Image (cartoon, rainbow, N blue to C red):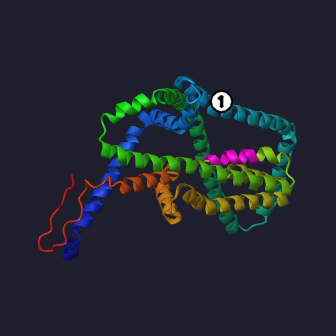
Amino acid sequence: MLSFVMRNRFALINLALWVVFAWLLYIGLSWFLPFVLPLLIGTLIAILIEPLVKLLTRIRMPRWLASMVTLLIFFGGGAALLLLLAAKLAIELADFTKHLPTLVSDVVAKGQDLLHDAVAFYGTLSPAMTEKVQENLDALSNTLARYGKAMAEAVVAWITNVPSMLTIFLLSLIIAYFVSKDIKKLQRLLLKFISPSIKEKGDVVRDDLGKAVFGYIRAQAILISITFVQVLVGLSILGVDYAFTLSLLAGFLDILPLLGTGSLFVPWAIYLFIVGNTKLAVGLLIVYGLIVAVRQLLEPKILAESIGLDPLLTIIVMYAGYHLVGFVGVLLAPFLIITFMSLMKVRAFDFLIDDGPDDDNDPKIIIKE
């Protein structure tokens, strides 16, 4: 064991340094990120809209106006589209509420029938079987209560975070405008404190991250479109009313990590089982199963192809990120891989301990400046 440690001491030191570096980076980001999140998002938005801003300035539009027009095109247009979709959804939901009393009465009637049958069956059991059934029912009720509480807490937490998210979003837009308006000045100011070699490395990392961001947006758009088409086709085959609106809702839920399409299909199928519409309930579960299977199969591959990563590496890092920080880790995993690979490409970690000379008699630690 000692001989193995002595032979590989430089590799072990490098490994230890990497572990310490990763841990310090995680701790630092966990503490520092909430304070600078609007600045980071705003800067990212400014970088993303820069091509269109440049195009508008070429037609002699002042830069401040070009930045404002670009933000209005992207976010004003997006808000208008969301309002139109919300209006259509509200119209169909209003129509749905007309049938809600009938649906509720059907559920209550079916529940009463099931309860009556269960009481009748329960009375025919032996005392030992009755005790066993009671234990299983208690365990089932505790499990359902636990999951229901966790889901309710998650929904409440998400709702309570909406004002904070809106505040961050508005601050990010304001920061994006000022950064975009003065981006040339900020670049010149920043370059005064950066050496040419570091600037060259930073350009490589920036280009790689820019490609990764656009690739990620493209990949998510493809996955959401696939989900929308799957739901639309599935519901149309099953003859479900409001198939288009429900498909839009499923696509929206597919974006949300804590909810997903299961928050639409699972309660819906449970309701249909209760009211006795078993055929449609099974059909919905089959559609949901296909959605989950297709997404799990395609997501790593599409992400890898859009961002330029190895699918196996992407799966491993996404899995590790999920266990470390939850769904945020899944979202950040591709960007962390890209950042690390870009930093390795520009030899940004050469300051760490490198392998010593191959002379076994007199190995030395080399520190690169």
Residue 277 appears in the picture as rendered? no
Query: Residue lying farthest front?
Result: 59
Q: Does the magenta stretch include residue 254?
A: yes
Locate residue 132: give its quadrant. Answer: bottom right
Determine whether, in the image, residue 265 is placed left or right of residue 101: left
Q: Nearer the viewer, residue 67 or 25?
A: 67
Q: Sort mark 1 into few (<14), some (14-19) or many (20+) by Cα contacts within 10 Å.
A: few
Determine whether, in the image, residue 6 is placed left or right of residue 182: left
Image quarter where the N terminus lies is bottom left
Residue 88 appears in the picture as rendered? yes
- Residue 17 is situated, as x and y percent measured from the top left of the image, at 27, 57
Residue located at (41% from left, 28% from top):
185
Q: Is residue 102 above or below residue 65?
A: below
Q: In this view, does 203 lie above or below 181?
A: below
Residue located at (80% from left, 46% from top):
244
Say which amino acid is labelled 1: Gly
Q: Is residue 106 magenta?
A: no
Q: Nearer the viewer, residue 241 or 22?
A: 22
- Residue 211 is situated, as x and y percent measured from the top left of the image, at 51, 49
Q: Is residue 275 above or below residue 129?
A: above
- Residue 201 is situated, as x and y percent measured from the top left of the image, at 36, 48
Q: Name the residue under label 1.
A: 76
Which secondary structure type mostly characterizes the magenta part of the structure?
helix
Report how many numbered discs are placed on residues in the image.
1
Span highlighted in magenta in the image: 247-257
